[in-house]
């Protein structure tokens, strides 16, 4: 079975952008902006206070 790294740290940058650090040491910057208008389970993303 392959090793799947997991998130060990998440830092909100701005405008729905998050910096993620994984257990293997890799760092990725992701934007969740495209999910904001999807609603459903993503509804809480509309409130930027959710990220703090």
Image (cartoon, rainbow, N blue to C red):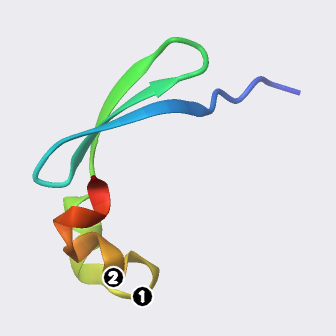
The residue drawn where x is 21% and y is 75% is 46
Which percent across, then down, holds residue 44? 33, 77
Read off the residue under disc 1: 40
Instruction: Check whether the beta carbons of the residues at disc 2 and disc 1 lie within 8 A of each other.
Output: yes
Helix, strand or loop at mark 2: helix
Foreground residue among 1 and 16: 16
Q: CA distance from mark 2 to mark 1?
A: 5 Å
Helix, strand or loop at mark 1: helix
Please tell me whether residue 20 is drawn above or below residue 41 in the rendered image. Answer: above
Q: Looking at the rendering, which quadrant does residue 20 occupy? A: top left
Foreground residue among 3 and 47: 47
The residue sitting at the left extreme is 15
Residue 43: assigned label: 2
Q: Looking at the rendering, which quadrant does residue 47 occupy? A: bottom left
Which percent across, then down, holds residue 29? 28, 33
User: With 33 as the anchor, is 35 left or right in this view?
Assistant: right
């Amino acid at each position: 079975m392959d090793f799947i790294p997991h998130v060990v740290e998440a830092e909100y940058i701005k405008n729905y952008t998050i910096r993620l650090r994984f257990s293997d040491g890799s760092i990725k910057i992701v934007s969740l902006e495209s999910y904001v208008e999807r609603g459903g389970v993503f509804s809480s993303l509309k409130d930027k206070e959710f990220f703090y």
